[in-house]
Image (cartoon, rainbow, N blue to C red):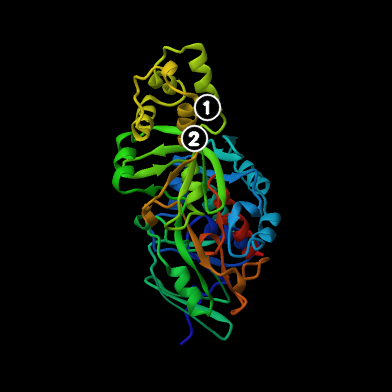
Amino acid sequence: MSAPASSRYDAIVLGAGAAGLFCAGRMGQAGQRVVVLDHAAKPAEKVRISGGGRCNFTNLETAANRFISQNPHFAKSALARYTPWDFMDLMAKHGLTWHEKTLGQLFCDQKSGAIIQLLLDELAAGQGDLRLGTGITAVRHADGLFTVETSSGVFTAPKLVVATGGLSIPKMGATGLAYDIARQFGHAIVPTRAALVPFVFTGADHEDFASISGVACDVRAVAGGAAFEEAMLFTHRGLSGPAILQVSSYWQPGEAVQLTLLPARDIAGQLKEAKRERPMQTLATALESLLVKRLAELVLRRQGLNPAARLADLSHATLDDLAGALTNWQVHPAGTEGYRTAEVTAGGVDTDGLSSRTLESRNVPGLHFIGECVDVTGWLGGYNFQWAWASGAAAAE
């Protein structure tokens, strides 16, 4: 039996997140009749919470080498054809402004709700249809048409764009639907894992880190061959902060993470200078001139050093050893906090089965996968939003 005329579209987009809404808006404004389906009650919830509600919507330093994928070249085409400046132009058209923080990160002055409204306004400008609270129960393909069965009825179209995201933050409705659809149509899935996620520890490390929860310091963190210099935060469960989130995407279970505290400073040189100029100063006082008191106390305790020892009574070798402990601190995470707090899912739909130009399936014409569900994972700092915009624009073509 043929589907009712009201459910026939030129394109169906699954997922009302950043990538799905953006792609649907562009297709609608290109003259296609498009519907966006999502089981969530509200659109773009991950956009809403991003950047602490301020929405770090892109990064000026966007390049393919800031993304993790089994095919490091895959993202180049889409990223080159829809750039951060293209999205900035779109924001300006909507009267939105932004500011740069650090490392090329751009934040919306009007906060995340304004970005969501931009996406909804773009969808409306293309006369797109948004159906929230609509559960997907089945997807079929025959005779050049996709049929999507939902809790709100049956929808058909010759083009299906899957933008349902990854597994991160399940309390916001994340599911593995994209991977299920990909497998159904013969696509391989690169094993998924939580990325941009805090580390957790057990034993003495857990106790020590929890004892100074809330303390932050600048570090250089190295794991899986990648290194990042940013802030690190001690938590009740372990370690977090930008540097840790970044290396978590490269870390493999069982590996150590190397930490260099205060990477921009010569700790050994400063301790020896303090000994020379203020020999009666205590070791604790000298170290507290470099580190927050609670962290300094923890470091001295872990090194078995007497905080009250006078610098004059300490050898240069002892000061070198202390500096070495701070510049080559090896920690062994028990794991990560997992998808519960992960900002993104690494892995996903294997890019070998997709066109790098249009994100279209090489197996099934008219089927596209975009955004987080694809095996393209950006660094922290707006890169994953730029992939959402770029991959959505590529599929919309």
Is residue 235 among what the camera can see? yes
Whole-angstrom CA distance, mark 1 to mark 2, is: 8 Å
Q: Quadrant of the C terminus?
A: bottom right
Foreground residue, 331 or 7?
331
- For residue 29, which numbered disc appears in the image? none
Residue that appears at 68% across and 58% down = 76
Q: Is residue 339 left or right of residue 34?
A: left
Residue 381 drawn above or below residue 25: above
Total number of numbered discs in the rendering: 2
Residue 262 drawn above or below residue 3: above
Residue that appears at 49% across and 22% down = 271
Residue under circle 2?
A: 324
Secondary structure under badge 1? helix
Is the residue marked by circle 1 packed among few (<14), some (14-19), or many (20+) residues within 10 Å?
Answer: many
Is residue 116 among what the camera can see? no
Secondary structure under badge 2? helix
Q: Is residue 200 left or right of residue 43?
A: left
Give coordinates of residue 341: x percent, y percent: 38, 51
Residue that appears at 59% across and 68% down = 351
Is the residue marked by circle 2 packed among few (<14), some (14-19), or many (20+) residues within 10 Å?
Answer: some
Q: Are marks 1 and 2 in contact (CB under 8 Å)?
A: yes
Residue under circle 1?
A: 268
Tell me which numbered mark, 1 or 2, is placed earlier along the sequence: 1
Q: Is residue 57 left or right of residue 151?
A: right
Give coordinates of residue 219: x percent, y percent: 50, 37
Residue that appears at 34% across and 48% down = 201
- Please name the amino acid that badge 2 sits on: Gly
Foreground residue, 75 or 69?
69
Residue 123 appears in which quarter of the rendering? bottom right
Give coordinates of residue 94: x percent, y percent: 60, 43
- Please name the amino acid that badge 1 sits on: Ala
Give coordinates of residue 338: x percent, y percent: 38, 55
